[in-house]
Amino acid sequence: MSTKIGLISDLHATLAPAQEALRLLSEAGADRILCAGDIAGYGAELDRTIELLSAHGCEAIAGNHELWYRQTIGNASADPLARLLGKLPAVINTTIAGRSLYMVHASPPQSCLDGIRLLDRHGNIIPEQRQAWSERLAGFGHDVLIVGHTHQVFAERLGDTLVINPGSTKFNHSCMLLSLPELKCTVIPLSGQGVVRAWNWGMETVNAAGKRGQSHATSTSFSP
């Protein structure tokens, strides 16, 4: 029997897209929700975003913005949000439906900053980056690696591992549904917008033809 895993990342303290992602994933039949970090940062709704994730039983890890939030609070132990964020693990390492799954914010084993960037500014795979990360992950030993951090949306087999970045709910307007053991990923657009496959500060995302680097809901199957 298939197990469906909802994947979100880089919510950045912005409630509305996170709410929409969780609603859509629930409607798609997600059995569990995993968040690849960066719940904090940029937005002003951190407390409500944390409450939302808690209400949905989301399993989350810490990203660089969680670490920075705790560091910038004068007395982190006295701040309830800092205490909650401080309890997040650096990784989730588990087995679901017979598939080994590892989740870290940027890259294994526990980096929050060394992100896996596979796409150019138009959302196309950069062959050299794909090759470099395939070599770095050689012998990684997990069926699935889930990351966030780079605000890129992809599901690519690198060596023996399916590497997935669901993108930022805030900036990429995306989340993903992963079916195991089939290793099938579906990208789900948010807010009726096309998914921005690659987003960074200062990147032009709109032109006369529409949004740059977009894709609509897609389903990609990967053979074991």
Image: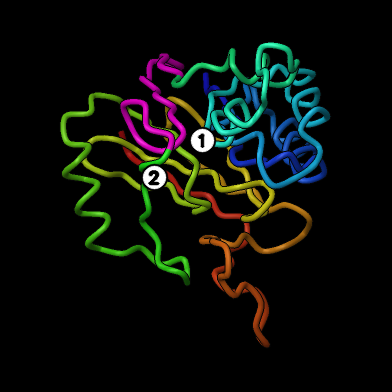
In three-dimensional space, the C-alpha distance between marks 1 and 2, rounded to whole angstroms, equals: 11 Å
Q: Which residues are magenta?
A: 92-112
Magenta stretch holds residue 95: yes
At which x and y percent is residue 149?
A: 49, 44
What SS does tag 1 mark?
A: helix
Residue 123 lies, with reference to residue 100, above or below; the image says: below
- Choose between 224 and 112: the one closer to the eye: 112
Q: Label 1 belongs to which residue?
A: 64
Q: Label 2 belongs to which residue?
A: 115
What SS does tag 2 mark?
A: loop
The residue most toward the bottom is: 208
For disc 2, the neighbor class at 10 Å (few under 14, some 14 to 19, many from 20) is some
Residue 220 lies, with reference to residue 65, above or below; the image says: below
Residue positioned 59% across, 23% down in the render: 60
**Which circle, 1 or 2, is nearer the viewer?**
1
For disc 1, the neighbor class at 10 Å (few under 14, some 14 to 19, many from 20) is some
At which x and y percent is residue 211?
A: 64, 73
The amino acid pointed to by label 2 is Gly
Left or right, residue 93 beside residue 126: right
At which x and y percent is residue 135?
A: 16, 44
Residue positioned 74% across, 17% down in the render: 79
Mark 1 and mark 2 residues within 8 Å of each other at the beta carbon:
no
Residue 56 lies, with reference to residue 24, above or below; the image says: above
Q: In which quadrant of the rendered view does residue 181 lie? A: top left
The amino acid pointed to by label 1 is Asn
